[in-house]
Amino acid sequence: MQLSIVIPLLNEEESLKELHDWIVSVMQSNHFSYEILFVDDGSTDGSWNVINQLSQKNPFVKGIHFQRNFGKSQALHAGFKAVTGDVIITMDADLQDNPEEIPQLYQMITEQGYELVSGWKKKRYDSIIFKNTPSKLFNWAARRTSGVRLHDFNCGLKAYAKDVVKNIEVSGEMHRYIPVLAKNAGFSKIGEKVVQHQARKYGSTKFGMERFINGFLDLLTIWFVSRFGKRPMHLFGALGVLMFFIGFSFAIYLGIDKLFINPFGRLITDRPQFYISLVAMIIGTQLFLAGFLGEILIRSKKGENRYIVSEEINTSLSDN
């Protein structure tokens, strides 16, 4: 199979049929062998019923239905686990991503040697104050922190070689940083393509301003994980040793001062340096122990993605 198209969604009942017909038109005109996998992230409208209807008419339509809303990262993880195509395309279900971009994305993976190609919505039809400006700030911070030179980390339209999606772990809220996860996994051929962005036709966005706050927090997380995820002792141990050394140096100073310089002066416990020394050594010890425990944990427990699938259409996710 040439293409697997993974579409995570939440309450997009109105747009699904139109999106399906548009994708099928592109697939047929380019003679692609394909599958369309809708991952319903616990929709409360009629989205799952629409997916069922589409699967009855089109045998290449598959579906996964979560028991409740678990998040986009979990939806993508389930989709990546179930797909079988050589190239995987992800796109949003709100008709803001253009399926006409798929053939070029496919060619960039199969002919130009890219392992991941991310869409760049250079011209956007979103609010300048509430979406465009925060998005530019977020993308700038993500570029500087991760070292991945993409203009639009948040674009849902991306193309992946099969090996990429089968070897990365998308958990928590890390769907924004899949290119960074891919880079950390050793996939360095990451490209970007300017794609057409369209105004939302139905419904309203499912994301508010809090996604940017969460995005920056996740950015700090992935920065830490990418640099110290496999060696936490290198960070916590180094900080612990530094703090303990500072505290111990104060203790040595106080001891020398009391024994040789000013033996009849104030009690050591009456001097502020004593408490600085004590606190610094306690914090240093705790940081060192945190690093030690981190090393034990990463050697004893593999990362987990938690979601509950209530129904499936034409997939074998539960058998994997």
Image (tube, rainbow, N blue to C red):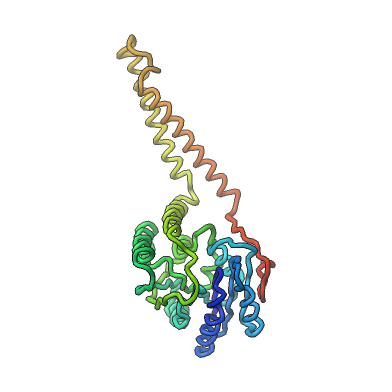
Q: Does 96 appear above or below 309?
A: below
x then y, percent, for residue 202: 49, 75
Specify the quadrant that holds the C terminus: bottom right
x then y, percent, for residue 24: 54, 85
Please report the residue visible at 53 percent of the width from the left and 70 percent of the height from the top.
163
Q: Is residue 284 left or right of residue 132?
A: right
Residue 209 versus residue 140: which sits nearer the camera?
209
Q: Which residue occupies the extreme left position in the image?
A: 261
Residue 29 versus residue 85: which sits nearer the camera?
29
Q: Quadrant of residue 143?
A: bottom left
x then y, percent, for residue 244: 42, 32
Q: Does 139 appear above or below 198?
A: above
Q: Is residue 175 left or right of residue 277?
A: right
Is residue 177 visible in the rendered structure shown here?
A: no
x then y, percent, for residue 193: 39, 75
Q: Does 145 appear above or below 54?
A: above
Please report the residue visible at 39 percent of the width from the left and 36 percent of the height from the top.
242
Please report the residue visible at 40 percent of the width from the left and 78 percent of the height from the top.
196
Specify the quadrant that holds the N terminus: bottom right
